[in-house]
Amino acid sequence: MHYVSADKISKSYGIKPLFTNITFHISEGDKIALIARNGSGKSTLLKVLAGKDTLDDGTLWVHKDVTVALFEQEPQFAEELSVLDNIFHYRHPVAEAMRNYEKILADGSKDHEALSAALAKIDELGAWDFEAKVHQILHKLNINILDQKVKTLSGGQRKRVALAQVLIDIGFEHKHVLLIMDEPTNHLDVEMVEWLENYLNQQKVTLLMVTHDRYFLEDVCDEIWELDNEELFTYEGDYQSYLEKKAARIENTVANIDKARNLFRKELEWMRKQPKARTTKSKSRQDNFYEIEAKAKQKVVDNQVELQMKMNRLGGKVAEFKKVYKSYGDKVILKGFDYTFKKGERVGIIGRNGAGKSTFLQLLQGLEMQDSGKINIGETVVFGNFSQQGLEIKDDMRLIEFVKNIAENFPLADGSTLSASQFLTLFLFPPEQQYTYISKLSGGEKKRLQLLAILFRNPNFLILDEPTNDLDLPTLSVLENFLSEYPGCLLIVSHDRYFMDRLVDHLFVFEGDGVVRDFPGNYSNYRIEERAKEKQKDAPKQPEIEAPKPIANKPATAPEKKKFSFKDKREYDQLEKDIASLEAEKVTITEKMMDQNLNYDQVQQLSNRMVHITQLLEEKEMRWLELSEYIS
């Protein structure tokens, strides 16, 4: 079933064209990721499909039986209403019954008659399966205070409530739903992102989304659209396949432009030799000349943020924590934390929201004081802090003014310098955009400007707090390449698993109650270990088999044992060999993963193999236990 068809649609923002004459179709079951640079029109296209914006030209058709649900970056709420009333705003009998039931539970009411009536209504509507789904969504997104007014929520809480709202909305008897999501993983911790991945994969939903999370993209989507230079390109397959096909497309385009340029030179020579009076045949060739000229003058611009900075010298002493304690009332952030940072160290920080990650960064920079203990910072350390708060600007100003207020020139590694304008150009802010007011920039463009402002100060200890939020994938990829070569210290708080896997050597895991564990490996290594622990914990314990007691006045006889067949005996012997071999391979892989010289692809292969081995071991050990019950 076709959900959406777009035929030669166009949209401009002022004088800037976003997309021109693009055509596409969305069918039931499609799961599509939309990729583009910030400011290219991704969010605008999503709003057009959701009916929240209009087209300049072209035809857009949405099937009359299809419900379009939009999750936006800046969700809109009834600010004076509670979280509960916003989530169950949908006018539907099941929604009203659920809202009433949840309200009674949230109030802690002892009105048994009201509770019984609410339960009876849900039973009458046959909505218990949906009620279980609602509770799962609220629990996984950590939405606990349903009576709180939306206007009092933080930015992250608002995003989670909006996500819960849209996931619950699409469950109200909509047989055909097109779910459109704009950066759904922003402000979610890693466990929430992994849950959302599984949830979307299990639901029969048609999906179009914008995301910078490449693991999320690969696990959920099977098709990628790229909006580039006003055109839309479609790629089947995962993110790696997209990168390969895009490279081939650009190479093919360059080859075609080269051919057009060669032909253009020949045709230009012919045009110059022609007399003013032309025959019909020469007029046709003249018209064709202008088409060739347009192709020949095409430019393949694969703009990238080029980062070649001169870092301030970092001395031998970097940063040291000695028996540091920090609490807020009953909430313990650090409990006797000890650590000494070394030159060039790359540390990732993970943990639940509210575990104290941001407080730790504040303590390191001296922006907050510890309760006790010492924090010593080296004299040569220059922090560069990429915070979630974004740009701090007292008054709106133009881009060029903002950068010049930091410095007029930027020193490069080769000893030369760049002017503020040249530096802005390298960060994909061309001269014609540099006099734009910062308030007019998109969210991703503001993030890019924030990064520029930090690097302009030449830090040697970079602190990145959720740097990937709102950055487009091309910019994010170049940022990763730069950071992988960055010689200074790097401290990263991020829910972007791909980003963490590429850049960090070990993790600080904030486990709560002041406990911070130093884990030797990247995020994928950590999750492998955690999943193994969870499976071991959830595995049913094998009951102890008691020998039957002898009957009184009769000689005790041994319990009758099941006789092994030849097949059982052979399987039992082979299982012992397989388990020993897998255990040995597991140890070998663990040792290999400690090697800091491994590249990302090698680490990923080892991680995948470790997951496979763990699953095999579980299966073989369970079977071995079954067979061993009959041997003594």
Image (tube, rainbow, N blue to C red):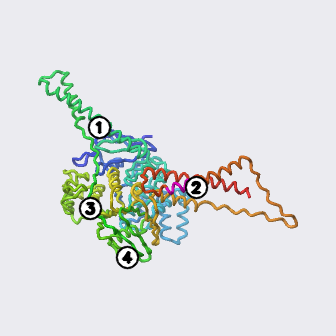
Distance from disc 2 to disc 1, alpha carbons, whole Å, reads 51 Å
Residue 458: image tag: 3
Q: Secondary structure at mark 1?
A: helix
Distance from disc 2 to disc 3, alpha carbons, whole Å, reads 48 Å
The mark that comes first in sequence, 4 or 1, is 1
Camera-side mark, 4 or 1: 4
Q: Secondary structure at mark 4?
A: strand
Camera-side mark, 1 or 3: 3
Q: Secondary structure at mark 3?
A: loop
Q: Circle 4 sits on which residue? A: 374
How packed mark 1 is, by other alpha carbons closer than 10 Å (few <14, some 14-19, many 20 or more), is some
Distance from disc 1 to disc 3, alpha carbons, whole Å, reads 37 Å
Q: Circle 2 sits on which residue? A: 583
Q: Label 4 sits on what residue type?
A: Lys
The mark that comes first in sequence, 2 or 3, is 3
Distance from disc 3 to disc 4, alpha carbons, whole Å, reads 27 Å
Camera-side mark, 2 or 1: 2
Distance from disc 4 to disc 1, alpha carbons, whole Å, reads 59 Å
Rendered-image quadrant of the C terminus: bottom right
Q: Are marks 2 and 3 in contact (CB under 8 Å)?
A: no
How packed mark 2 is, by other alpha carbons closer than 10 Å (few <14, some 14-19, many 20 or more), is some
> Residue 568, image x and y in percent?
71, 49
Residue 26 in which image quadrant? top left
Magenta segment boundaries in residue numbering: 584-591
Q: Circle 1 sits on which residue? A: 254
Q: Closest to the observer: 34 or 250?
A: 250
Q: Secondary structure at mark 2?
A: helix
